[in-house]
Amino acid sequence: MTDNFEQTTSPEVNNASRKLTRGLTRRRMMLGGASVAGVAATALAGRAQANTQKPPEPKTNSDRNGKFAGKVVLITGATSGIGEGTAYAFAKEGAKVFFCGRRENLGKQVEAKIKSFGGEATYMQADVRKEQDVKSFIDGCVKKYGRIDIAFNNAAIESKPATIAERSLEEWMDVMNTNATGVFLSMKYELPHMLRQGGGVIVNNASVSGHVGFATIAPYSASKHAVISLTKVAALEYSDKNIRVNSISPGAVDTPMLRRALAAWKTNFKAVSQDYPIKRIVNVEEIARSVMWLSSDDASCITGMDVDATGGYLTK
């Protein structure tokens, strides 16, 4: 019997095979019951996949036959940051994106960009602190597209650093009304449409601050704790109606909000990244893909869950 694997595999695998089999007799290799070339190829493949935390490159154009083709996705606060990045990601996978934000000029820019790469999107100005704005926004989506398959309740603001004793009630209420009440109002008006159409998916944007306390950001932390609680309650109330409700908790993500926060705290990306096991700042595309997974049929049994997207911070 001759060793013919060198004739049927690549030079790279052959070299790896020689290293793995150095010192082995033919009998020992045969008794092992496995192809040496296969073992070598597996070892090489393992090295090729070693960097599991490297974000893949985002798509550049819309795929009308993508994973979310024909789906209607509603997003609040999509004029910048995570909301904006998620709007791009869904549109590139074929979804029809209906989104809001308070800043009309930015909203029109995001809408134009989505259309420029072949996606479909509609911007509507709305302030999630105002009940009528939220209702009009959600009703507007149904009027235009007939349904809401996926809702990403993302709109949020931060406040300047201050202790509780120094915090003004106005600042407290502004953050709570945007981040917590805004999610409540969004679900209040999304859920009836999803009930009528027979189902849907809701993802609420929480935060690492919804799990742990950070000094000087009491309103933000309290509001994100509320988002996680609202998510669990909604999941319990509607899971038997074919509506899944989950939340996602990002940590430090490269957004305008983070950059403002770092400036206020007089720190930088490198210093902050050392607090995270992955030792880097997450990008918006990574959060968008996590939202898309929660929204997909791949997560069909996931409801009432908050997904840790902090890069390992919450495991410490």
Image: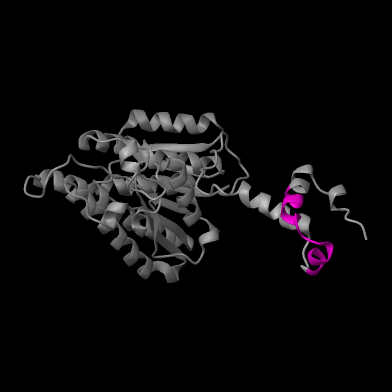
User: x, y (%) of residue 125?
Assistant: 33, 37
Assign the magenta stretch its main secondary structure.
helix
Q: Is residue 256 above or below residue 239?
A: above
Residue stretch rendered in magenta on the structure: 16-31
User: x, y (%) of residue 204?
Assistant: 36, 54
Nearer the observer, 274 or 202: 274
Say which residue appears at 79% left-offset and 45% top-offset.
Answer: 10
Q: Quick one: which residue is furthest to the left in this view?
A: 165
Quadrant, the C terminus: bottom left
User: Left or right: 127 with respect to 38?
Assistant: left
What colour scheme was applied to this rendering of the protein? one colour
Say which residue appears at 19% left-offset and 41% top-offset.
Answer: 159
In magenta stretch: residue 25: yes
Image quadrant where residue 140 sits: top left
Q: Is residue 279 above or below residue 198?
A: above
Quadrant, the N terminus: bottom right
